[in-house]
Amino acid sequence: MAGTTICHRAPLSLSLLRRRSYVRHPSLLPVYSQLSTDTASKGKEFEGRVGFLGIGIMGCPMALNLIKAGYDVTIWNRTKSKCDNLINLGAKYEPTPEQVASSCDVTFAMIADPASAAAVATGENGAIQGLGSGKGYVDVSTVDGATSKLICESVQKTGASFLEAPVSGSKKPAEDGQLIFLTAGDVALYERVASLLDIMGKSRFYLGDVGNGAAMKLVVNMIMGSMMASFSEGLLLAEKVGLDPNVLVEVVSQGAISAPMYSLKGPAMVKATYPTAFPLKHQQKDLRLALGLAESVSQPIPIAAAANELYKVAKSQGLSDQDFSAVIEALKAKLQN
Ligand SMILES: NC(=O)C1=CN([C@@H]2O[C@H](COP(=O)(O)OP(=O)(O)OC[C@H]3O[C@@H](n4cnc5c(N)ncnc54)[C@H](OP(=O)(O)O)[C@@H]3O)[C@@H](O)[C@H]2O)C=CC1
Ligand SMILES: O=CCCC(=O)O
C-alpha cells in the first residue's frame, strides 16, 4: 500500500487531502507520508534565493511567476538570448548551472529530456558543483525514474537535498500558475519549496520515493499521447465520410469523452495549424520512456506502442518542434500512401 499526499492550493481548509492507493511496481516502495498539514498545505513562505535552469516554453513562464511574486530569481539557459526578457523583468543571470546553484538556496531545473537534464545537473559546470549542505535541487523536467535517481544520488553526495517534481499542464497553465506538481523525494525540501510550487501550480502531489513522480508523469503522458493519436484518427475519419470535423469537436466536447485538450486543440487541428505548446518531440520522448517503464514490469501497452510509432513518423516528417497535435499529419501521410 502506498500513501499519496495531495495538496490543492485552495480552499486552504480542504487543501490537504490524503488517500491511499495500491501500487504494483516493485520500485514504488510502500510509503505512507505523514506531512504536517499546516506546513504542507499552506506552504510556509520560502526564504532565500531561487535558481532556475532551462528557460524554454515551460521554464520561462514558471520562472516569470516567481519573479512576479517578488522572489530573487537567478536564471541560466544554454541559449542565453532566451533569458533576455526575464533579465529585463528583474531576473539575475549566471553563465553556468554551477554558478546558479552556488549563488542560490534552491535551484529548479526544467530541461528537455533525460540526457540533457543529467548533463545540466552533473556535467561540466553542472549544478551539483555549486550545491552543498543546506541547498536544494528540484528537477521539474520530464525524465525517467533511472535518470531522476542518478541526479538525486549526485545531488545528495554534495550534502544538498533533491526533489523530483515533473509537472502536468502545458504552456498556458504554466503562464497562469495552474500546473500540477508530481513530487517525490526529500520531504523536508518538499515542505521548504511548497510556497514556490503554489505560485507556479494549482496542486501538488507528494508520491514518496524518487522515481514515483517520474513514473506518474510518464503514465499520464502515455495516456495523453494515445488520446491525441486516437482523436486525430477520428477527425480524419469524420472528414473522409463527409462529416464536418468541427462538428465532431463540438459533439466530443459535450459528451463523456470531453477533454480540454480536444476543445483547445481540435479547431486548430481542423485548420492544419499546430502552434507549439507541447513540442511533438517531447511527447514522443515521453511515450518512449513510458514504453521503457512498462517493459520494466513486463506490461504490454500496445495502444501506446502504436501511438509512439505514429509520433516517430511525424518526427521523420520534420514536425518535432510543432505542437504534438501535429501527429495528425502522420496519419494524413498514411492516408495518401
Ligand atoms: N511544453 C509542455 O507542455 C510541457 C513540457 N514538459 C516537459 O518540460 C521539459 C521542458 O519542455 P519545454 O519547456 O516544453 O521544452 P523546450 O524545448 O522549450 O525547452 C527545453 C529546455 O531544455 C534546454 N536544453 C535542451 N537540451 C539541452 C542540453 N543539451 N543542455 C542544456 N540545456 C538543454 C533548452 O535550452 P535551449 O533553449 O538552449 O535549447 C531549453 O531550456 C521537457 O522535459 C518536457 O517534456 C512538461 C509539461 C508540459
Ligand atoms: O508534458 C506535457 C503535458 C502537457 C499537458 O499536460 O497538457
Image (cartoon, grey):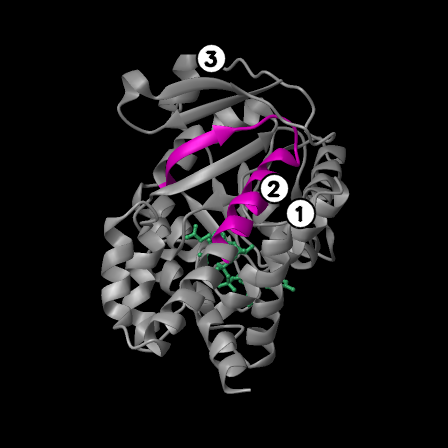
Residue 298 falls inside the magenta stretch:
no
Q: Earlier in the sequence, mark 1 or mark 3?
A: 3
- Which quadrant of the rendered structure holds the C terminus? bottom right
Q: Mark 1 points at which residue?
A: 144
Q: Tell me: is circle 2 under 8 Å from ligand 1.
A: no
Q: Which of marks 2 and 3 is nearer the N terminus?
A: 3
| Pointers 2 and 1 in contact (C-beta within 8 Å) | yes
Q: Name the residue under label 2.
A: 214
Q: Is mark 3 on a helix, strand or loop?
A: loop
Task: Give the residue type that dot 2 points to.
Answer: Ala
Q: Which of 219 and 110 is in front in this view?
A: 219
- Residue 59 is situated, as x and y percent measured from the top left of the image, at 46, 54
Q: Which of marks 1 and 3 is in front?
A: 1
- Residue 200 is situated, as x and y percent measured from the top left of the image, at 38, 42
| The image quarter in which residue 135 lies | top right
Start-end of magenta stretch? 200-225
Residue 83 seen anywhere in this rendered image of the structure: yes
**Residue at (33%, 29%) from the top-left corner?**
9
Q: What element carries label 2?
A: helix
| Pointers 1 and 3 in contact (C-beta within 8 Å) | no
Which disc is residue 36 wearing?
Answer: 3
**Residue at (51%, 36%) from the top-left corner?**
182
Query: For the residues marked 1 and 3, what is the alpha-carbon distance in whole angstroms?
Result: 29 Å
Q: Which of 232 and 208 is in front in this view?
A: 232
Q: Nearer the viewer, mark 2 or mark 3?
A: 2
**Above or below, comparing residue 297 to residue 58 in the picture:** above
Residue 217 falls inside the magenta stretch:
yes
- Residue 329 is situated, as x and y percent measured from the top left of the image, at 47, 77
**Residue at (51%, 57%) from the top-left corner?**
225
Task: Give the residue type that dot 3 points to.
Answer: Ser
Q: What element carries label 1?
A: loop
Query: For the residues marked 2 and 3, what is the alpha-carbon distance in whole angstroms?
Result: 24 Å
